[in-house]
Each structure stands twice: as C-alpha cells, then as structure tokens.
Image: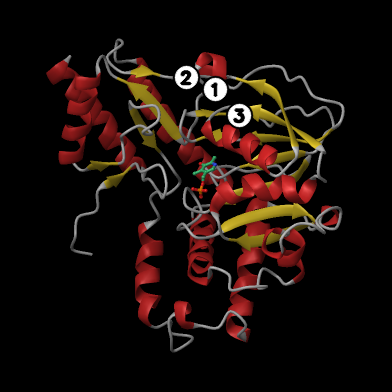
Amino acid sequence: MSIQRVHNFNPGPGALPLSVLEEAARDLVCHPDSGMSIMEMSHRSDEWIARQDALTASLRRVLGVPEDMDILYLQGGASLQFAMVPLNLLAKGEAADFVVTGTWAVNAVKEARKVGRVAFEAASSAATGFDRIPEGLSLNAESRYLHYTSNNTIFGTAFSAPPDGGGKPLVCDASSDILSKPFDFGGHDLVYAGAQKNMGPAGVTIVFVRRGLLGRVGADVPTMLAYKTHAEKDSAYNTPPVWSMYIVGLVLGWVEAQGGLEAIEALNKAKAALIYDAIDASGGFFVGTVQRGSRSRMNVTFRLGSEELEELFLSEAGEAGFAGLRGHRSVGGCRASLYNALPMESARALVDFMGDFRRRRG
Ligand SMILES: *Cc1c(COP(=O)(O)O)cnc(C)c1O
C-alpha cells in the first residue's frame, strides 16, 4: 500500500494487523470463493454458516473455550452487555457483586440497577481515582455472581489474576484484553467482549456463556435481549454482523500464525515493558498514573508536568506519525494503547520519540 500508515496507539477501535486489512481489502468487492463480497452474502446461506462455524471453532481453539459454553455474536457493544448480563443471569430483585475499577465497571453497576437487579459494590478503587485494582472483597451472601473488568481501558489498570469470588461464579468484561494472553475460563459463567480492541472491527460483541444458565430467567426479557434467543438460533435470530465476524476470523488466523496466545502475550509483555521503562527512567518527566502492581499491558496511562506540556507532546507526536495517544476525555493526560496488532517497532519508535521530546523540553 502506498499510503503511509501511522503508529496506531488508538484505544478502540484500535489497530488491526496489516495482513488482515490487506486480505479484507482483497475480498471486499469479491471473495474468490464466493463471487461476491462477504457483506453481500445471506447469513442463512450454506457458505456463511460454514464460515461462522469455522469462526466458532477458531475461537474455541485459540482461547480454549470449554464445550459447555455457548459463543454468541451480538451487537450493541459491551455497553449493552451491562444490561443484558443482569437481565439474563438474575431474576428481578436478585443480586450480584461488582468490583468497581473504573468507568466501565461503574456503567455495569448502573445498568444492573436500571433493570431492577441489585448491584453490590464488593470493592472499589474510586476513592483513589481508580489508580489500582482494589484488594479484598466484601462479597454478599445473596449475590449470584461476581462481575469484574479484567482490563480498565480508561484508567490503565488490569487484574493480574481473576478476583477470588470465594466460589461464586465470575462474570468478566474482557473487552480490552481478550486475545492478548491465554485466558482461563474456569470459574467463569460468562465472559463478554466488544471486538474493536483486540479482536476485530466494531460491530460484533462476543459472549461466552455457560449453556446451563440460559433457561433460568428471562420470560420478561425482550426477545432480542435474551441470550436464549441467540443461543437457540446460532446467533441468527436476526441478521448477525457478518462482515465484522468475518474480520474476527481473519484476526484469529493471524493470532495462530503468530504462535497463538502465549506468543502474543510475550510480545505484549515486551511492548508494555518498553513503555513503562521509558516512563520510569524519565526522572519524573513522564509519570505513570497507576500503582505498579496494577499496571495494564494494554493501556499505558501517563502524565507530563503540565497540561501545556501534554498538549505540546500530543501535537508533536501527531506530527511525528503517532496516533491515538490522547488520554480518555474524562481523565486527560496521555495513553498508549498497545493492542495485539501494534507492532513492536511502533512501541520502540514511541520510546525513542519520548526520549527525544524529554531531551528537548525537559
Ligand atoms: C471499550 C470498552 C467498553 C465499551 O464498549 P462499547 O463497544 O463501546 O460498548 C466496555 N468495557 C471495556 C472494558 C471497554 O474497553
């Protein structure tokens, strides 16, 4: 491709592997096996059904999804899951515990309450500005599950291991770290993730849910909001987001070609270590915003000495070919999102740029 691609540190939608984009571009107008674009294909055609089955098989293989979990392809983003999870796993008035680690967890609590379910805050790091993963949970006996956000995209924190729900089933919003490392579904009843951070383009949200849970509640749940509807119809009760799903399939193929999730994790660890080391070695010119033990490998958040200096850094970075480094609008500062498809060379280039900027402006 002749157009110069930037170093893409966008927080979501985020970078996709170049080879995936090139393959998708080739197939955009006409997939060679089909004589048409995947976008133009009936979701009820044998060809699409075979493609979707292959996608599901890839997800099971790459992520190790247990056989007793269904995989659903939904729309509405992780944000719709904040309501769908309690609607489907809790009867009216039933309760769940939440670990409140940032904006997305706060929204999950809000939506659970909106749909008439009880949401307990088992732990929260709100008091310290969500700069850490809180320690110690006060679980409520009547809660049916514990909800947590494995990686906090906005604040830059991540769980290094799932929280201990004391035997309670876990529900995980894994939107921003799914596919970034091996994942243990053990102990989890439900895991959900929007695709647009590590898995593919926006438009599809993937839900992994224990089949046994699907019939428990839901008579009063609108058809489209009931997992059972989608599970019984293989996610084709209505038209699924076929193009986004197709790209997720290409991304999974790319992950396997990289050596699978162990190899991807090693690369992600190395990228994050580079950036954190640059921050830590800057003599306070760059300052990380979260406690060391809670640092995310996906979203590295940091500040400079003043907002003016941050603006200068962001604008010079933009001119130098680095995109997406501005912190979330709710928190300010800077954030480097290091999703799977961000190459090591982009992380190295950012470290060089940070060092250069510090020498000129420090
Ligand atoms: C991006 C994100 C969301 C919101 O996703 P939408 O697809 O915009 O609804 C929720 N949770 C986490 C952890 C995220 O990173």
Percent x, y of residue 182? 62, 43
Side (left or right) of 159 relative to 139: left
**Residue at the extreme top:** 283
Which of pointers 1 and 3 lies earlier in the amino acid sequence? Answer: 3
Which secondary structure lies at badge 3? Answer: loop
Evaluate whether residue 65 shows in this view. no
Element carrying mark 2: loop
**Vertical placement of 259 versus 161: above or below?**
below
Mark 3 Cα-neighbour bin, 10 Å: few <14, some 14–19, many ≥20: some
Q: Tell me the kind of residue under disc 3.
A: Phe
Q: Residue furthest bottom?
A: 35
Q: Is mark 2 within 8 Å of ligand 1?
A: no
Q: Residue 290's mark?
A: 2
- Quadrant occupied by the N terminus: bottom left
Q: Amino acid at mark 1?
A: Ser
* Label 1 beta carbon less than 8 Å to ligand 1: no
Structural distance between the alpha carbons of marks 2 and 1:
7 Å
